Image (spheres, rainbow, N blue to C red):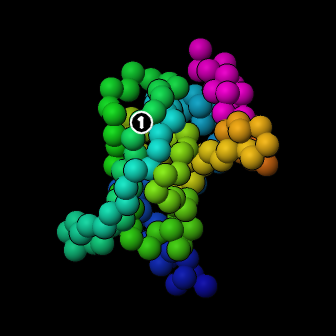
C-alpha cells in the first residue's frame, strides 16, 4: 500500500507544471480570495508535446472575461502529464469547453480540480450553469458571489 501511495505522490508532482497541486480543500470564498486571477475562458485547442522527455497534454484557452485581477492575456496554455486526466489529477477538458478558471500568480489552476468550474448551458433557460461543492450556480450568480468575496 505504501508503495502505491508513493507512486501516486510522485506522479502527482509531475502534474504541477500547470496545475498547482494542493492538498488544501478550498471553500468557494477561500478559492476566490486566494486566486489573484479569475477568468472565464474557452478551450480552443488540445495538443501534445514533450518537455525533458516527459509527454505533456497542452490545453489552450481563449480568455473571454476577466472576473478578478489585472489580467492582460488573451490566451493561456495549461500543461499537464499526458495521462493525468485518467489518474483524475486534472479535470476532464474537451475542445469548446467553457469554464471559470481560478488561477495562481504563475497562471496555474488552484487546487487539483477545484479551480476549474466547467460551465454548461441549461437547455430550458439557456443560462450557463456550474456547480461547486454540490451547489449549482448560474454563471451570473457565481460571478456576483466571487466579486463579493474579493472586494
Q: Give the labeled residue for mark 1.
A: 63
- Residue 99 lies left or right of residue 47; in this view the side is right
Magenta span of residues: 138-151
Give residue 26's position: percent from left, percent from top: 64, 42
Disc 1 packing (10 Å; few <14; some 14–19; many ≥20): many
Towards the viewer: 86 or 15: 86
* The C terminus, quarter of image: top right
* The N terminus, quarter of image: bottom right
The correct choice, above or below, for 7 with respect to 21 in the image is below
Q: Is residue 122 visible?
A: yes
Residue at left offset 62%, top offset 21%? 147
Magenta stretch holds residue 146 = yes
Counting labels gives 1
What is the chief secondary structure element of the magenta stretch? Answer: helix
Residue at left offset 71%, top offset 39%? 126
The furthest residue to the top:
151
Residue at left offset 54%, top offset 82%? 4
The correct choice, above or below, for 118 with respect to 149 in the image is below
The correct choice, above or below, for 58 with respect to 75 in the image is below
Magenta stretch holds residue 51 = no
Q: Is residue 130 visible?
A: no
Give residue 115's position: percent from left, percent from top: 56, 45
- Residue 88 lies left or right of residue 76; in this view the side is right
Towards the viewer: 136 or 108: 136
Q: Quarter-wise, where is residue 143 in the image? A: top right
Amino acid at each position: 500500500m505504501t508503495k502505491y501511495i508513493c507512486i501516486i505522490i510522485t506522479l502527482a508532482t509531475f502534474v504541477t507544471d500547470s496545475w498547482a497541486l494542493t492538498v488544501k480543500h478550498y471553500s468557494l470564498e477561500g478559492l476566490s480570495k486566494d486566486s489573484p486571477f479569475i477568468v472565464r475562458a474557452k478551450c480552443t485547442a488540445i495538443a501534445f508535446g514533450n518537455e525533458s522527455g516527459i509527454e505533456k497534454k497542452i490545453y489552450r484557452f481563449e480568455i473571454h472575461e476577466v472576473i478578478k485581477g489585472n489580467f492582460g492575456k488573451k490566451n493561456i496554455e495549461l500543461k499537464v502529464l499526458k495521462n493525468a486526466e485518467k489518474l483524475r489529477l486534472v479535470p476532464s477538458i474537451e475542445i469548446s469547453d467553457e469554464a471559470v478558471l481560478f488561477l495562481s500568480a504563475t497562471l496555474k489552476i488552484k487546487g487539483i480540480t477545484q479551480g476549474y468550474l466547467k460551465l454548461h448551458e441549461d437547455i430550458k433557460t439557456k443560462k450557463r450553469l456550474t456547480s461547486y461543492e454540490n451547489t449549482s450556480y448560474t454563471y451570473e450568480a457565481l460571478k456576483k458571489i466571487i466579486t463579493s468575496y474579493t472586494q
